[in-house]
Amino acid sequence: MTPTGLDGRRVLVVGGASGIGAAIADAFRAEGATVATADLRDADLRVDVTEESSVAAVAEAAGPVDVLVNSAGILTQARLVDMSLAQWRQTIDVDLTGVFLACRYVVPGMVERGWGRVINIASQLGLKGGVDLTHYSAAKAGVIGLTKSLALEVARAGVLVNAIAPGPIETPLVEGITEDWKVAKQAELPLGRFGVPAEVAPTAVLLASDPGGNLYVGQTLGPNSGDVMP
């Protein structure tokens, strides 16, 4: 066993084809875990997190899962007064309902086996909000609320549920955001820069580790360049 206790653990990373999800998958592999990634593209398993049947099929194909990481997401930019209902719904469906569905189909097996870790990727914008990102901020605030509530439901069964709320990270997700927004955001950060995925992944390893993650229940950890200081 490695010091993290992850050697041989079975990990499913939803949204593991790129960005933070891919970095987390690599970090778990480095700890000796058996990792499957699920995504719309370039993954071991293809999944559309907005479709219940797709998520259910992936959960069945993945088999028993010890660690579930929910990292699938989209990010678009619009003022609320200009936002269409379709844009709002798409973001909520992917960034929040997708997390619900993955948990709904994977967590029961963890409860049955008496051990599991769920790590939901939220955002610091779910804590503080963001201009032009009402839909994204609302979805990520929902992820944090879901995380706390599910943690209360399953902790006694040996399943620990936590969230990570990164600050701005250099990933394909932010490519659709305007350069003006990114420059202004970077200027706000005490650290003075965006992070990179490899700087977020160790937090996921910590939360899944034994004994390192054993006392984290319903928590939201923030590798965010100082953007939020709880």
Image (cartoon, grey):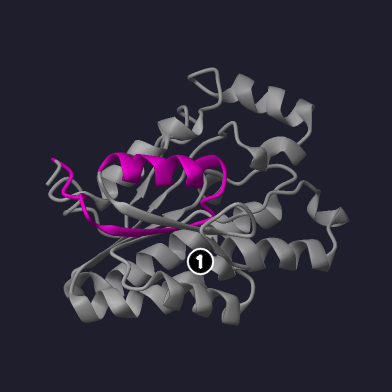
Quadrant into which the C terminus falls: top left
Q: In this view, does 97 lie to the left or right of 67?
A: right
Q: In this view, does 170 lie to the left or right of 179?
A: left
Compared to residue 108, the image places residue 91 above or below, namely above
Magenta-drawn segment? 3-31
In this view of the protein, can residue 172 be seen by the observer? Answer: yes
To which residue does mark 1 refer?
A: 99
User: Is 211 included in the stretch rendered in magenta?
Assistant: no
SS class, disc 1? helix
Say whether residue 230 is visible. no
Q: What is the number of callouts on the image?
A: 1
Q: Residue 165 versus residue 38: which sits nearer the camera?
A: 38
Is residue 147 rendered to the left or right of residue 42? left
x and y, in percent, of residue 137 in the image: 61, 52
Residue 11 among magenta residues: yes
In the rendered image of this protein, does residue 135 appear above or below residue 190?
Answer: below
Residue 18 lies, in percent from the top left, at 57, 44
The residue lying at 37 percent from left, 54 percent from top is 35
- At which x and y percent is residue 27? 36, 40
- Where 182 falls versus 163 (above or below)? above
The three-letter amino acid code for the residue at tag 1 is Val
The image quadrant that residue 153 belongs to is: bottom left
Residue at the image position 56 percent from the left and 33 percent from the top = 169
Q: Residue at image x 20%, y 68%?
A: 115
Mark 1 packing: few (<14 Cα in 10 Å), some, or many (20+)? many
Q: Where is residue 104 in the image (x, y as percent from the top left)?
A: 44, 78
Which one is in front, 118 or 13?
13
Q: At 69% across and 53% down in the image, what residue appears? A: 134
